[in-house]
Image: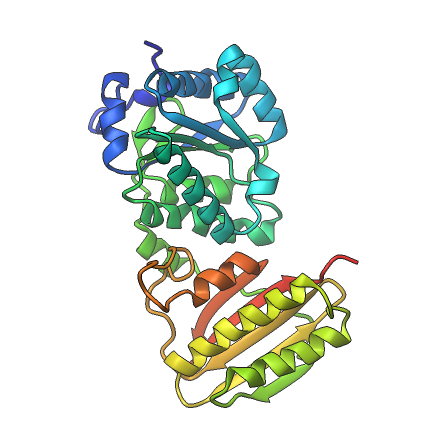
Amino acid sequence: MVRSELSVVDPGVPALKPVEARMAVRDRLTHDAFFYGTDERFTDVLAPFVRDGLERDHAVVAAVTPANAGLLRDALGPDATTVTFIDRDDWYRRPASTVAGWRRLLADATGRGHDTVRIIGEVGFGPPARHVTWTRYESALNAVFADAPAWIVCPYDTRVLPRTVLADARRTHPSVTVVRRAGSGAYRPPEQFLDAVPEPAPPVDGPPTVVAALGESVADARHLVRHVAVEHGWDGTDRLDELLLVTSEIAANAVLHGGGRRELRVWTSAMALVCEVSDDGPGPTDPLAGYRPPDESMLGGRGMWIARQLCEALAVSRDDGWTRVRYMLLHPPV
C-alpha cells in the first residue's frame, strides 16, 4: 500500500491514514490546501496521493497547469493513463461553471461505480482583480459539496502566488499541508467568509450609457439592453442571447423580490458590456446564492445560478437602501 503524505496529520487533527481514507472521504467532503515551492515537492506529495486513490478504486481527476500535468504524468508512469487530466486554464473560467463541471464529473464517476473521487484542483487565480473571485469560489466549495464523496486537494505554488492568496487559502480550507497535513486555525465557514469578503463589482469607466427606471415588466430591461448591445456589434451572436438571458433573470429577481423602485444602468466599452439592476428591496439573504446549484424539483430559484454561469463577473452589493446586481459580459469575438 502506497502511503500518501496527505494522510499524515499533526496531533489533534483527525487522521486520514490510508486504511481510513476510503471511509473518511465517502461520508463527507475533504478539502485541503497544499503549499509547494518546488516541482519535486509537488510530485512527492501528489503522486502518492493519486496512487493511494487508484489502489482503492477511487476516480482521480487532476485540473492543473500543463507543466504540472507533465510532472505528474512522469511521476506516475503507467498509472497516469487512469487519471483524468484537465487543463486548468480551460477549467477555471467562471466559478459557477467550474462548480457545474465538478458536479458532472462526480456524477459520472459515481455512476461508473466509484464510491469516492479524488480531485487535484489547481485554481487559476488569474490577474489580481480576480483573486477575490476565485478565493470566494474556494470557500463556497465547502458548502456546495459538503456531502459529496470527494477529497479535493488544491495546490498553491508559493513561488508565484501572492501572500494574500496564500493567507486566504488557510481561511478557505479546513486542512492545510505545508510540511505536514494539519487543521487550519484560520479556517472560516463559507457563510462567514463570503459575507466578510464581498465580490468586487465589475469596474466601469465614466458615466453609464443608459440610466432608466424599470417597471413591472422584464421586457423593458431586455429592450434597453438589446438596443445598446446591437449598437455595439452584438447583433446575431450567441453572446447577445446570453446577455439578454442574464438580464431577464436579474430583472425578474428585482421585480419578484425587490421593492417598488427599480433602475437599470448600462456601461459600454470595446471589450465588454456592464449592466446594473438595482432595487430598494432587501436583496438575497443567502451568501451562496448563485454558487449552490438549484434544487431540480423546484420551478424557480435558478436566476443567480444561470447568471453566474454566463457572466465574466457578477457582484451583489447593498448600500444606501438599494440592492445592486452588477454584471459584465465580454464582447463577442469578431
Kindly indicate the quadrant of the structure image that contains residue 49: top left
Work out which residue is located at the far top of the displayed protein and give it: 1
Which one is nearer the viewer's eye here, 231 or 95?
Answer: 231
Residue drawn at (76%, 76%), measured in percent from left and top?
231
Judge whether residue 203 can be spotted in this image: no
Judge whether residue 217 can be spotted in this image: yes
Q: Quadrant of the C terminus?
A: bottom right
Which one is nearer the viewer's eye here, 118 or 155?
Answer: 118
Residue drawn at (60%, 45%), measured in percent from left and top?
126
Q: Is residue 199 above or below residue 220?
A: above
Kindly indicate the quadrant of the structure image that contains residue 242: bottom right
Q: Is residue 37 left or right of residue 53?
A: right
Residue drawn at (52%, 18%), measured in percent from left and top?
81
The x, y position of residue 68, in whole percent, is: 58, 25
Work out which residue is located at the far right of the displayed protein and give it: 334
Report the number of numbered marks: 0
Q: Is residue 79 above or below residue 313?
A: above
Kindly indicate the quadrant of the structure image that contains residue 88: top right
The x, y position of residue 43, in whole percent, is: 50, 18
The x, y position of residue 12, in whole percent, is: 20, 28
The x, y position of residue 97, in whole percent, is: 51, 50
Residue drawn at (57%, 19%), measured in percent from left and top?
71
Which one is nearer the viewer's eye here, 197 or 330?
Answer: 330
Work out which residue is located at the far front of the displayed protein and give it: 112
Which one is nearer the viewer's eye here, 161 or 226?
Answer: 226
Q: Quadrant of the N terminus?
A: top left
